[in-house]
Amino acid sequence: MTHGGNIYEIEKRTGIAKDSILDYSSNINPLGVPDGLKKIICDGIDDLTKYPDINYHELKDSIAQYYRLSVEDILVGNGAAQIIFDFINAVAPRNTLIVQPTFSEYERALNIGGKNIIHYFLREEDSFQLNVDNLLKYLAADKSIDMVIICNPNNPTGRLISKGEMMCIIDFCEENNIFLIIDEAFMDFADEMGIHTLMNECKKYKNLMVVRAFTKFYGIPGLRLGFGVTSNLDIKNRIELLSLPWNINTFASYFGRILLSEDKYVANSFKWLKNERVNFFNKLNEIKVLKVFSSETNFVLLKLLENNYTAKTLQANLLKRGILIRDCSSFKGLNEKYIRLAVKDGASNERLIKELKSIIKEKNTWINKC
């Protein structure tokens, strides 16, 4: 699998019913769909007989109000992936640097247009934290680079680059005519999100696009809804010219009402994450054959330290017990020793820890190491 959360593929391949799988490969809020959205969908079912507002005024107004943005700087799309694809298509860069390991769709979007890709790899010895000074030196040495893509917090490493460091990158890119995409799909899970987000900087920098997703935090991957922020009017107009009309469905177009009304859902989400993230990480750290990397979001990257055991093997063994994890060997810059786990509710996390320890004890090569 090149993405997490593909329980349909697992069901087809293994015969295991998708509804019986505890999915740790998908980084989705375990609180599920907000009750307000369920009501909107039930009450508005007859609205499916009408086309959505092709300009999505209500949704854009709500996003602008909630995040304190200018409505004219907002683009909405069928998931954050569409915003990424459309922006790359509109800019048509010649040479793009991607900070790796990261989300695979950046590269796929660039490959569709035959663009040249430069892979800039984070290092395990730095705990996959970006060294901004080294990145800027690299960019200064290669004048051909005209686009940079950074995921912050990064998927799959969970590492967050501070706003101060990100501003250094933005300033450098602005001075050197480099377009910069910052994917903040997991920023809503970060502590003090408002301090770290770069959305409000888009008004000052014409070379900047910040991408956000509602999918993860609000538990709605099936709704497909994301947005981008840029003040570059030429690029924005080009995106709107190239994009398909009605690219968001009726119920997704109503999501602004949820954004402005679900304060309790947001508070409960932060309470869950604060309580479960530290506890989950601590229990994973007790398993001596796992290297646990620090994370600022709702998932964690792990490395298997036993030479004779791979992510694929562990994934297969856990799947027999009804649990799906993310094998990270498909991420550039990682290998068959890395896995990613979402943070879920306490009971689910306890079950996963128990099954992990059980599998480890069954392995003769591991039995005396945990």
Image: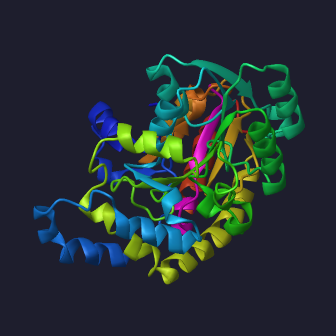
Q: Residue at x 71, y 23 (%)?
A: 145
Does residue 364 appear in this view? no
Q: Is residue 184 above or below residue 345?
A: above
Residue 78: x and y in percent read: 37, 49
| Magenta-drawn stretch contains 340 | yes
- In this view, the residue in front, 262 or 206, is 206
Quadrant location, the N terminus: top left
Q: Quadrant of residue 37?
A: bottom left
Residue 341: x and y in percent read: 58, 48
Q: Residue at x 44, y 44 (%)?
A: 237
Q: Is residue 278 above or below residue 107?
A: below
**Position of 37 compared to 161: left or right?**
left
**Position of 109 compared to 190: left or right?**
left
For the image, the number of numbered tags is: 0
Q: Is residue 149 above or below residue 342?
A: above
- In this view, the residue in front, 194 or 263, is 194
| Magenta-drawn stretch contains 36 | no
- In this view, the residue in front, 182 or 21, is 182
Quadrant location, the C terminus: top right
Q: Which color scheme is applied?
A: rainbow
Q: Please state the extent of the stretch shown in magenta in the rendering.
A: 336-349
Does residue 166 appear in this view? yes
Q: Quadrant of residue 129?
A: top right
Residue 30: x and y in percent read: 47, 64
Q: Residue at x 57, y 47 (%)?
A: 232
* Residue furthest front as drawn: 234
Residue 124: x and y in percent read: 79, 33
